[in-house]
Structures are given as structure tokens and as C-alpha cells.
Image: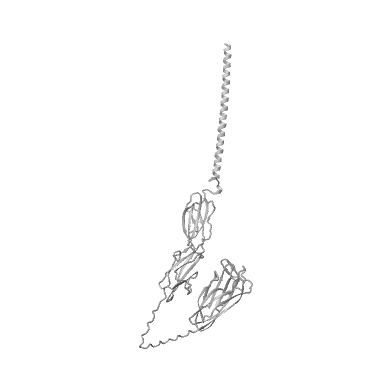
Amino acid sequence: MLVMGGFIVGTNVAHAGATLFLSPSGGSLTVGGSISTTVVVNTGGDPINAVQATASFPTDLLEATAVTQSGLFDFWPVTPIYSNGSGTVNFAGGLRDPGYTGTSGSIVTITFKGKKAGTATITLGSVMILKNDGDGTDLFTGAGSATFTISEPTPITPIKPTPVPDTEEPEEPEPDIEALPAPVIYSDTHPKQDSWYTDNSPAFYWDKLEGAEGFSYSFDDKKNTIPDDTTEGTDNKANFKKTKDGVWYLHVKVLNKGGWSKTYHYRVQIDTTPPLEFDIRMEGENPTKLQEPKMHFATVDELSGVDRYELSLDKEPYAVLETGETEPFTFSKLPYGEHTTEVQVYDKAGNIQSSSLDFNVIKYSTESGFWLWSHFILFSWLALILLIIILALVILLCLFLFVCCRRKEDDEDEEQKKQSRWKKAILNKIRKEKN
């Protein structure tokens, strides 16, 4: 089974139609010379999304010197690789929906060098051609081969120079003109080849050398591409709009009377996609009684990589962290109350992804009281207040009763005094009448 980012393919019941072959399927080369052949797929009219195979060659006659991806596939579960020890070239590649439907899909190109004279046959085996149907139906029905004839190089017979009569003066040979050096490439938009940039419209210029008759250049994701021998003119600049994310290369060579120069390669790295989304997680409960809470947060950037984390607390900068310093992050002693932390993640191109978390640091646990507007009221406080109120009411009641009793006693004393005065008055009156 082949597993690729974006889809999973496997083998199922065979289905007629798809073949794998080599192009060219024949040719000749000399010992020490090179020849290339490309593995090509014919889908037979059905859409496919994956191919794997092994190309075998005789190690006594041929030596593999290179294997390159030819552009059909985006994913390589098995990166194309060759072994001169076992005489094999292995690969497995795939691509996204809707897959590929065609008769000449180039997969990989293999370059061989002749080792000794003979006839070498290259065969394809262990082939699977999987249909883009969600089940990975194997459509493979047959594979071709290629036969190359290797011969000894023809010896070069030296040409004897024609003698020149003494009466004639020998012609002066024309001076040899050397090819120009490779033109050095520069970029104002992407000045550093090992840095990442969000600008997806790179612009380049290169040395306009004296004697240059034209330039040839190409722009792709291959490191060592050699441009073709067709001149693009004498203009020494180029720019490319809406370039996809990834690592790209500009290849430039120059032509003069001495021929084509070597190729100069310039790399640009483009990343316009921010790191993956993430959440901030606090250890324990929220609200928390910890004044030094621990936070967990981490993410990845699938292209240029994470550069740093910038942490803020209550909208104020708090810390800058390098990758690997975030698990977990512990705040210094925080004041009680509500807080907000925000984490901004920067990738190496400058793209930003952010996340935030609101949390509360409390002095007492939520089970010990309740919030009253912006104040936290403890149950113990409430019980104490109720006890004080009850005691106050009891004291007031006692005072009230005491006052009432005293008032009643005073009234009784006053009544007794009144009665005593009346008694005295009556007795005095009786005494006077007797006298």
C-alpha cells in the first residue's frame, strides 16, 4: 500500500488498460558514453493517482549515473533512487485529484553510462498503476523494455598536416575565443539565498558581460537545471509573478563567440502561508488559585519552519520564546484578577498565526464563595456577617426588654409614690378635723 499526503491508495482487483514503457526503447552508445531513457505511463483512458515500479539493468554493461523526477507526480513515497550494486532503479510517486489521464505521462528519467561493449536490456518490474477511484484499483496490464547497443569508441586517426612549401608564408591561426564565465545573478526582492520571503513575485538581474550575444535562462524547482541553447535575447533581467510556495531556482548562462558559458544557479525560498492554527491550554482549572499558572502552546510551520513565539499579557509584551522553549511556559507571580494572554507565532518568512486565552487568578476557590458583580464573596464571610447580624438583633432585643422593664418599674414606683402622698394627705386632714 502507498500512503501519500492527501490520499491513500492500495491495490484492488485488476483493471485493464494501463501500461508502463521506456522512451526511447532503443539506441546505441559507446563505452564511456551516456544515454537516457524515460519511464512513461499510458493510463488507457482511466485517471490514475500513483505508480510504483523497479527498473532493472545489467550492471556489467551499464552504470546508472542519475535519476531525475520528470514532473508528473507531486508526492514521492519512494524517492527515485538507483543502485549500481543491485542494478535497480526504484520509485513510487503520486499526485492529487483529479489524477492523470493520458498516454505519455513522464515519471522519471534515468541516465546510463556504457561500461563495456554488448547489448543491454532494461526491464520494468514490480509495477502497480493505481486508479484514482478511492479504492486504489490496480490498472496495470503490461510493461515495455528498452534495448541499447554498446560499442567500443572508434579510434581517431590523426590527420597529417599538409606540408607547406618554403616559398609560402604560413597563415597565422585565428586566436581562440574562450566562452564567458557564468553570469552572476542578483535579486533585490530576494537578496539572500538562504532566507525565506513572503514576496511571491521574485525579480532578478545578472551581469551583462562584454561580448555577450545572448542569454538563456529557466526558472524551476530543480537545483541543477541547465537551460537550453536557445537565446532569450540580450536583456539581463527577469521576473516571475504569483510563484507558488517552495524553493525555486533561476538558471542563467551566456553565449559569446566562444560558445555557451557554464550555468549560474540562484535559489529563492518563498513561503506565504502562516503556521498552523493552535490553542493555548492552561494546566488545571480556570479560574485558578495559582499565581504562576502554566500554559501549553505549540504549532508547526510546514515550509519555512517556526522562528519564534511572542507572548503578551493584558495587551503588554511579556516574553519572546525560541522554538522548543514553550512546553510549558510559566508566568511569574501574577496579581489576582482577570487576565488575557496572546501568543503570536512567526515563521521564518515572517508570516504570523495567533491565539489568545482569557483566564482568572483568584485568591479563593470557587467552592468557597460566589461572585457578586466584580467582587468574590466567601461563604465564611457571609456566615460571619449573618452571625453578627443575629447577635446585634439579640442585643437590641435585650436592650429593648431591659428598657421596657425599667420603665415599668419606674411607673410602679411613681404610682406607689402617688398613693403614699394621698395617704399622707388624708391622714393629715383627719388629724386636723379631730383637733
> Quarter of the image containing the N terminus?
bottom right
Could you tell me which residue is drawn at 57 percent across and 20 percent down? 420
Whether residue 295 can be seen here: yes
Q: Where is residue 285 in the image (x, y as percent from the top left)?
A: 54, 53
> Quarter of the image containing the C terminus?
top right
Q: Where is residue 282 in the image (x, y as percent from the top left)?
A: 53, 55
Q: In this view, does 38 lie to the left or right of 17?
A: left
Q: On the image, which quarter does residue 385 sit in? A: top right
Relative depth, front residue between 433 and 210: 210
Relative depth, front residue between 137 and 384: 137
Q: Position of residue 214 (x, y in %)?
A: 45, 72
Whether residue 60 can be seen here: no
- Residue found at the far top of this picture: 435
- Residue found at the far front of this picture: 167
Q: In this view, does 421 lie to the left or right of 212?
A: right
Q: On the image, which quarter does residue 175 sit in? A: bottom left
Q: Where is residue 278 in the image (x, y as percent from the top left)?
A: 53, 58
On screen, residue 339 above or below 165: above
